[in-house]
Structures are given as structure tokens and as C-alpha cells.
Image (cartoon, rainbow, N blue to C red):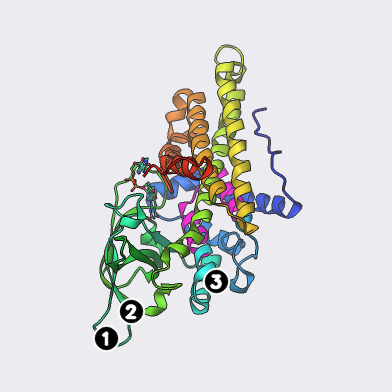
């Protein structure tokens, strides 16, 4: 009674075994462990290291650097399954998904040797800083600038500016920073470059944002006060940063969608069980269609979001253009998780608002997927323009 069936996805034995192994490991920690580290304000380090040792963190990265040689489908599966156990770890989306994918695609051989094995085994983490207080969604407006360093003869730059909502920079060893060049082109646009900057660099500091999310990772405003950056910290070519960032964008959207889907599965599982067990008028509350139908609808929405998410991951892995699919998957998952969690809380009555039941403290995490990593409005702009051929609206 009250079980959520899992028959929708076409998965081979290897993927099913991976799903099971992740579920078993993360389930042995469980929601109460995650709530405990969140309350204590510490990263879930033991779980992170065990996931690294089991090969889950680098499942999508090349074997030559300690990875599993799989693809985005495998990582999406790991992230969905982790969240479905009530442990949605943001750092999975940031370090292995964005940074790992981007470094594997564009870093120099030395940089790959230095960073990828640590990302895979869980001993190194990399944060990501693109968002700025005054630029918002419009990346062309960022003002963090890489000024050529004329003080020595080694070349390089000094980074000056400010980022915000940099998740997990306090626990990261380095941060990927998108910065502009000092000179604008004839259209008034500055070329962007991407740098991998150690978090203990002189001039780099960060200040915690008082955020509503109840997760172990903290968010920060990050300050770059003439941070020295040597040429070996540049990823790809100078001025070509946007192209490198794109290598991290699809993985970010797909894995964020997978995380949202995992939270939704967790919420539905709890709701279905509770609705089968709780009796108020002599029959389980799941008997009432006011409880059953919204739950069934949420299940349908979540399954559709999952199908789109894994489809987007497959497209990425096959080298196809996955921009539209990743964006649509993120939208669908962001809507589905909010509806699923809302109804799971409602199904639990007053208990839905007790932390003991592990639902309401997920609210702002679920709600975030409507805003980040890309807002629903920007997704709809993309769809209107690129999928429907409507005039660009912004
Ligand atoms: C918990 C959390 C973690 C995050 N982690 C990171 C991170 O690790 N690294 C990082 O770089 N960033 C991170 N972000 C930032 C996140 O990616 C941005 O908040 C998000 O992309 C929205 O940008 P913004 O906040 O600047 O909103 P704005 O761009 O200021 O937009 C405000 C509102 O206006 C709407 N809007 C803007 N332009 C248009 C338009 N043209 N048409 C219609 N509507 C529009 C938006 O959709 C939004 O609803 C994080 C954010 C959160 C909340």
C-alpha cells in the first residue's frame, strides 16, 4: 500500500544497478542525516566522500582522470536517486556536473590532471560564479573584469568585481569565474573569459547570504579585489568564455531537473504512504479523491518531467543540440516538484509542517527550481523565440 511504482524509464541492467547502489548508499544516511548536517551548518562530508569512493561523483567523467567513463544520463541518475532519498545535495550540480563537465571539455591537460581526479574521488570541490547583483540574467552586463596585469612580466590578469549566490564557495577549493575584458567591442559588448581561481587566492573573500533554503550548502556574495590570475588559470581562449560556459549549462539544467525530480519522488513516496496509513473517518485518507487525484496528477507531471530530463541527457550524450530539451526539462521539473511537494505537505495535514516528517523544510529548495539555475520566465522567452519562432522579447 502507498508505494510509488517505478516502471516508466527504459534502463538497462547496468543503469538499474547504479540506481540501486546509489539508493542503498544514500538511503543508509537518509533524510534525518541530511536534516542534521543542515541544522549544524556543515557539509555532508562523510556521504560525499563515500559517494566519491563508490565512483558516483565522477560517473560521467573520463576514465583517464578517475571517472567512470559514462555520460550525463548516469550523473542525472545519481543526482535524482540521491534527492529521492531526501538528500538533495546542491554541490552535486555545481562541482561534478557544471565544473567537472566544463573542465573535461575545455581545460588544459595539466588542469584536468590537477582537478578531475579530486572531483571524482570527492577530495576536491569547485564552485561556479557567473551571477552578479547588477547584471541579473543578462550575462552580457556583468562587470567583474579581468584587467591585464602589467606589474610583472608573466602576463596574467587581476580580477576585480563582485558575484552573488555563489553556492558552496566556503567548502570549495576553487571557483570557476566568468569575467569580462576591459575593452568593449563596437556593439558595446565585452568579451568574456573563464578562469579557475583557487578560493584561498589573495583578494578573494565572501560573505554569507541569509537565504531561506534549508540545505547544508551556503550561498555567498563573492568579492574579487584585484585577485591575481596567472595564464594557467584561464580555461580555453581569452574572450571565448561564453563558449566554455555552455559546456556546463546543459549539464547544470539537466542535473538540476534531475534533483527536482528526485525531491518530487521523495515527496510523493511519503505522501502515498501517509495517505494509505492515516485514517480519520474510518478509511485511509487516500480513499478521498481530494487527496488521491492531486497526488495522481503530481505523479503524472513528475514522470513526464523525468522522461524529458533523461531525454535531454541522452541528447547531450549523443552530441546533439540539447539546449531546448534541457531547458524544457528544467521547466517541467521545476513546476512538477513544487506541485508534488505542496500536495505531499497538504496530505500530511498539520504533520506536513512538522520537521519530523521531512517535507516542509524542503519547500524553498523545491521553490528555487522555478528561479535557478535559469528562471521560468527566461525558459519561456527561450521557447517563445527559438521553439515557436516569435520575435525576441528582450
Ligand atoms: C539558491 C540559489 C543558488 C544559486 N547558485 C548559484 C551559483 O552557484 N552560481 C551562480 O553564478 N549563480 C547562482 N544562483 C543565481 C541564479 O542562477 C539566479 O538567481 C537566476 O539565474 C536568476 O537571476 P537573478 O536572480 O539575477 O534574477 P533577475 O535577472 O534579476 O530577474 C528577476 C526576475 O525578472 C525576470 N526576468 C528577467 N529578465 C526577464 C525577461 N527578459 N523577460 C521576462 N522576465 C524576466 C526573471 O525571470 C526573474 O523572475 C543561485 C540562485 C539561488 C536562488
Q: Quadrant of the N terminus?
A: top right
Q: Is residue 379 toward the left or the right of residue 294 in the image?
A: left
Q: Nearer the viewer, residue 227 or 42?
A: 227
Residue 292's spot in the image, x, y percent?
59, 21
Residue highlighted by disc 1: 152
Estimate the spatial distance between the alpha carbons at disc 3 and disc 1, rounded to whole Å. 32 Å
85 lies above or below 284: below
Q: Is residue 27 visible?
A: no
Separation of marks 2 and 3 at Cα, in angstroms: 26 Å
> Residue at image x 50%, y 79%?
110
Label at residue 117: 3
Q: Residues within 10 Å of mark 1 (few under 14, many from 20)?
A: few
In terms of depth relative to the viewer, which is nearer, 209 or 39? Answer: 209
Please say whether residue 47 is one of the residues in the magenta stretch: no
Q: Nearer the viewer, residue 169 or 231?
A: 231
Judging by the rendered image, the residue that carries numbered circle 2 is 156
Query: Residue 360, position in %: x, y?
Result: 44, 34
Amino acid at each position: 500500500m502507498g508505494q510509488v511504482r517505478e516502471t516508466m524509464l527504459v534502463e538497462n541492467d547496468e543503469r538499474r544497478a547504479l540506481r540501486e547502489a546509489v539508493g542503498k548508499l544514500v538511503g543508509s544516511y537518509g533524510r534525518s542525516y541530511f536534516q542534521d548536517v543542515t541544522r549544524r551548518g556543515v557539509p555532508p562530508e562523510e556521504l560525499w566522500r563515500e559517494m566519491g569512493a563508490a565512483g558516483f561523483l565522477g560517473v560521467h567523467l573520463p576514465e583517464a582522470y578517475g571517472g567512470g567513463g559514462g555520460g550525463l544520463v548516469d550523473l542525472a541518475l545519481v543526482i535524482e536517486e540521491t534527492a529521492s532519498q531526501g538528500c538533495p545535495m546542491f554541490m552535486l550540480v555545481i562541482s561534478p556536473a557544471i565544473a567537472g563537465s566544463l573542465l573535461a571539455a575545455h581545460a588544459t591537460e595539466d588542469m584536468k590532471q590537477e582537478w578531475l581526479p579530486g572531483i571524482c574521488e570527492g577530495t576536491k570541490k569547485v564552485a561556479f560564479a557567473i551571477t552578479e547583483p547588477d547584471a541579473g540574467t543578462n550575462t552580457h552586463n556583468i562587470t567583474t573584469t579581468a584587467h591585464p596585469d602589467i606589474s610583472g612580466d608573466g602576463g596574467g590578469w587581476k580580477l576585480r568585481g563582485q558575484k552573488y549566490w555563489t553556492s558552496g564557495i566556503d567548502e570549495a577549493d576553487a571557483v570557476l569565474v566568468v569575467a569580462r575584458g576591459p575593452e568593449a567591442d563596437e556593439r558595446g559588448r565585452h568579451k568574456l573569459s573563464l578562469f579557475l581561481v583557487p578560493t584561498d587566492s589573495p583578494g578573494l573573500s565572501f560573505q554569507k547570504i541569509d537565504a531561506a533554503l534549508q540545505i547544508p550548502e551556503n550561498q555567498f556574495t563573492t568579492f574579487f579585489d584585484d585577485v591575481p590570475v596567472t595564464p594557467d588559470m584561464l580555461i580555453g581562449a581569452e574572450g571565448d568564455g561564453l563558449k566554455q560556459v555552455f559546456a556546463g549549462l546543459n549539464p547544470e539544467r539537466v542535473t538540476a531537473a534531475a534533483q527536482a525530480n528526485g525531491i518530487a519522488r521523495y515527496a510523493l513516496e511519503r505522501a502515498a504512504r501517509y495517505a494509505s496509513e492515516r485514517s480519520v473517518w474510518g478509511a485511509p485518507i487516500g480513499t478521498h479523491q481530494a487527496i488521491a487525484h492531486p497526488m495522481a496528477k503530481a505523479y503524472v507531471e513528475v514522470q513526464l518531467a523525468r522522461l524529458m530530463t533523461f531525454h535531454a541527457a541522452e541528447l547531450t550524450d549523443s552530441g546533439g543540440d540539447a539546449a531546448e530539451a534541457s531547458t524544457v526539462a528544467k521547466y517541467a521539473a521545476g513546476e512538477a516538484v513544487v506541485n508534488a511537494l505542496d500536495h505531499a505537505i497538504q496530505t500530511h495535514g498539520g504533520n506536513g509542517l512538522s520537521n519530523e516528517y521531512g517535507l516542509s523544510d524542503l519547500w524553498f529548495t523545491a521553490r528555487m527550481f522555478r528561479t535557478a539555475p535559469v528562471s521560468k520566465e527566461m525558459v519561456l522567452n527561450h521557447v517563445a523565440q527559438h521553439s515557436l519562432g516569435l520575435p525576441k522579447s528582450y
